[in-house]
Image: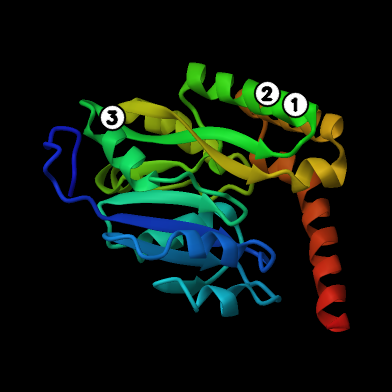
Amino acid sequence: MISAKQSSAVNVKISVIIITLNEEEFIERLLKTLQHENNLEVIISDGGSIDRTTRLARKYADKVIVGDRGRGLQLNAGAEHATGNVLWFLHADSIVPDNYKHHITEALKKPGVVGGAFTLDIYSELTSLQFISKVVSLRSKISRVPYGDQGVFVRRDVFEKMNGYKNIPLMEDIEFGLRLKKEGGVSILGTRIKTCARAWERDGVFRTTLRNWVYVTLFFMGYSPQKLYNRYYRKMLNQTMSRDVIRQREN
């Protein structure tokens, strides 16, 4: 497996792990952009979608795994089936940059670097969301702790040493990032990865931003991820699932 001490001549194989739950609106677009790349393995880790997500995914992905719902569980399940020496975790609504493989491999050539992520860009014409993108980018560059929608990548051996993601219902990306920093350098690339603005559009820019910042702050203060999840996200997820069921029946 590739390590921080190995030379740039090492052949890098990237396993892309995408977690999904009713992502038929976005998944095909993402998977098409990941086609025809050498030494790239695409794995879908689905949490029980009831729409066309897995059907669409099987047209493009190397592996489609269906298991229990939960971001930490799904991320780890995908990693278990990966054969690459680098793991790259993506959200289904991401728009990846051109030459993404080059950016990742170049970052991992640097001495001591064990992983990293791209700079977040929320694709929206709203000035407020463009400002939020800049704030998030600055935060991640200073803290070296990326959010999950920044396209986190990590050396396979380091991921295994860390025992992967924690099985917690919320903040699994922040918790993982904090532990990753202890293993070595975390590179926040200047290259941007775009993410969908649907959460902000659905719940409102101010409300969503305030909630996210409050919840991250509470997490750093030691507040239980399970309590944070119960406080808001379980209700939101149940509402989303209910809407999906209605759409499925209508179709």
How far, Cα to Cα, is label 2 from label 3? 27 Å
What residue is shown with label 3?
113
Helix, strand or loop at label 3? It is: strand
How far, Cα to Cα, is label 1 from label 3? 30 Å
In the rendered image, residue 114, in percent from the top left (x then y), is placed at 30, 34
In the drawing, what numbered circle is on residue 50?
A: none
Taking the spot 50% from the left edge, 65% from the top edge, the residue there is 32
Horizontal side of 16 relative to 124 (left or right) equals left
Amino acid on which the number 1 mark rests in the picture: Val
In the depicted view, which residue is nearer to us: 58 or 209?
A: 58
Amino acid on which the number 2 mark rests in the picture: Thr
Helix, strand or loop at label 1? It is: helix
In the rendered image, residue 105, in percent from the top left (x then y), is placed at 28, 41
Upstream in sequence: badge 2 or badge 3: 3
Crowd class of label 1 (few under 14; some 14 to 19; many from 20; radius 10 Å): few
Helix, strand or loop at label 2? It is: helix
Upstream in sequence: badge 1 or badge 3: 3
* Cβ atoms under marks 2 and 3 closer than 8 Å: no
How far, Cα to Cα, is label 2 from label 1? 5 Å
What residue is shown with label 2?
217
Quarter-of-image position of residue 132: top right
Quarter-of-image position of residue 78: bottom left
Horizontal side of 105 relative to 50 (left or right) equals left
Amino acid on which the number 3 mark rests in the picture: Val
User: Is residue 64 visible in this depiction of the protein?
Assistant: yes
* Cβ atoms under marks 2 and 1 closer than 8 Å: yes
Horizontal side of 142 relative to 235 (left or right) equals left
What residue is shown with label 1?
214
Point out the image quarter for the C terminus: bottom right
User: Is residue 231 visible in this depiction of the protein?
Assistant: no
Horizontal side of 195 relative to 192 (left or right) equals right
